[in-house]
Amino acid sequence: MKTLTGADRIFMALELQEPDRVPHFELTLDRKVKEAILPGASYDEAVEYFDWDAVVTDEEDQPGYRVEILEGGNYFRDQWGTIKQDMGDVNAYPIEPAIKSEKDLDTWRPPDPDESWRYEELARLVKKYKGQRAIAVLFPDPFRVANEVRGATDHFMDFVRNPDFIDRLSGLIRDYYLRYIRNCIEVGAEIIFIQGDYATTRWPMLSREHFAKHVIPVFKTLVDEAKSRGAYTAKHTDGNIMPIIDLIVDTGIHGLHPIDPLGGMDLGKVKGEYGHRVCLIGNVDCAYVLTWGTLEEVREDVKRCVRQAARGGGFICMSSNSIHSAVKPENYVEMVKAIHEHGKYPISI
Amino acid sequence: MIDLSEIAKSIVEANIAKTEKLTKVAIDADIPAEEILNKGLVAAMQVIGEGFERGEIFLPELLMSGEAARTAVKLLRPSLTKQEGVRRHANKAAIGTVQGDVHDIGKNIVIMMLEANGWDVTDLGVDVAPEEFCTAVKENDFQILGLSALLTSTMPNQERTISALKAAGLREKVKVAIGGATVSQRYADQIGADCYATDASDAVKKFKALVQ
């Protein structure tokens, strides 16, 4: 059997097959954690040290995404016009929406998806890693962008008081991302990874009807666009998505992340019900185990994931959200070791 | 005489204009504000809260009903604060997101639900330092202080805030409640909080229990 590359492993997993070992990569590796493990290392050096099977470039990390830096340097206006505060953690947090009234939408315009700076890091990763490691681009779901650009409270209430407004706003964001996806795939992206939470730890944020009518169709349009151009697709959403998981899987996505343990999601149950239709990506607990747990607890949680989801293929082992700033560096190192050790096919644990 | 269950119904249906109109009618009919609050608003928010807990009502409906109830609270507030003997209903709480954390959606929904249930809530904002929480507790008469934290990395600041309250001799002055996606009852016990609420609906129940 030929030696598989990281890209081979990822694509086989997304095709619901068994590669030689369970693949691994992360959507986010916090700077402080990386620095503690590999002082002074670049992203590429970290990728190679941990032997990630995929590399990721995040739209929100590109230099032009922060259109205007505001007072003190911690505040900025993003490309959608939302003012955000950067607290140095995984995602900057929206503090002032761009669209404060329905009238504002008349003059609001999405950014230009054809600006070349958006694709420079992607092109660099493609040139360096194509064929060796899978190339993924990460960007927010139009639902999340709308929630930020409109302000969460108003956006949620719009679903009841003005659903046409929801559709109009989502449509503008969707059209930007259709073009963005096409451009990314032309540059060489192989996985279109769309992130944005649909649920809280208790339930989905919206009713099933609202998801089915206003959110899922927009998301599916993006999935269809990516698939029609030969790319794989994956969706990240935290929370308890069980009441709507069928709607998400029915869009035809290849991968679903993270099967959130904080939301009470059971990886084994989801594997049993949907593992024949979608590659599961997750769900080593980064809220407790990677943050507070012992090395032994980390190893046990990796083994749990492998036991619950690896057999038969269709599994990528990853943290249950990100390697955020509170993760113990030694715990992440142990997690990677444990995946490589216990994730060899055929699975023997 | 106006049937107060109609006010409750209009809130459940998230009909803000109707809620406002019926509340004004009830006030003009000299129905005590306390009675309007209990039979209209609190009754409605109980229905909404239970539906939310069962996964039958979601954030848009919860927020819209909350907005309707807040409209009524604004109309009732002057009467409520005037009436002797109903002060116990104007329970006072303050809520803020702890230092290093600027997430506010959960906090805002909790405030909305508490206000809809007649609470007088002070929003201390986000990224609130332990000493700022202490100052707020010292200078006011809050019965409950709510500490919100969404991130695993900022959870320790809930504990630091409780320690600061102790150091300032203010811990016995106020009950402390914590919440946030990564927080748990186990963590609340560990850091010496008085209560942990899973969501806004749970917070209303737990806050009420804490002051009874």
Image (spheres, rainbow, N blue to C red):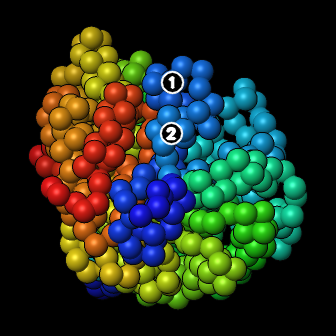
Residue drawn at 49 percent across, 47 percent down: A52
Which disc, if any, is residue A38? 1
**Residue at x 51%, y 24% (from the top left corner):** A38
- Left/right placement of residue B88 relative to residue A115 reads left
Front residue of A251 and A52: A52
Toward the viewer: A179 or B147?
Answer: A179
Query: For mark 2, does the 10 Å Cα neighbourhood hold few (<14), some (14 to 19), or many (20 or more) residues?
Result: some
Give the mark nearest the N terminus, 2 or 1.
2
* Disc 1 secondary structure class: loop
Q: Residue at x 69, y 36 (%)?
A: A75
Subunit of label 1:
A
Residue drawn at x 73%, y 75% as measured from the top left: A178
Q: Amino acid at mark 2?
A: Leu
Q: Residue B59 placed where, x, y %?
A: 42, 69
Tell me residue A323's x, y (percent): 44, 40
Q: Is residue B65 visible?
A: no
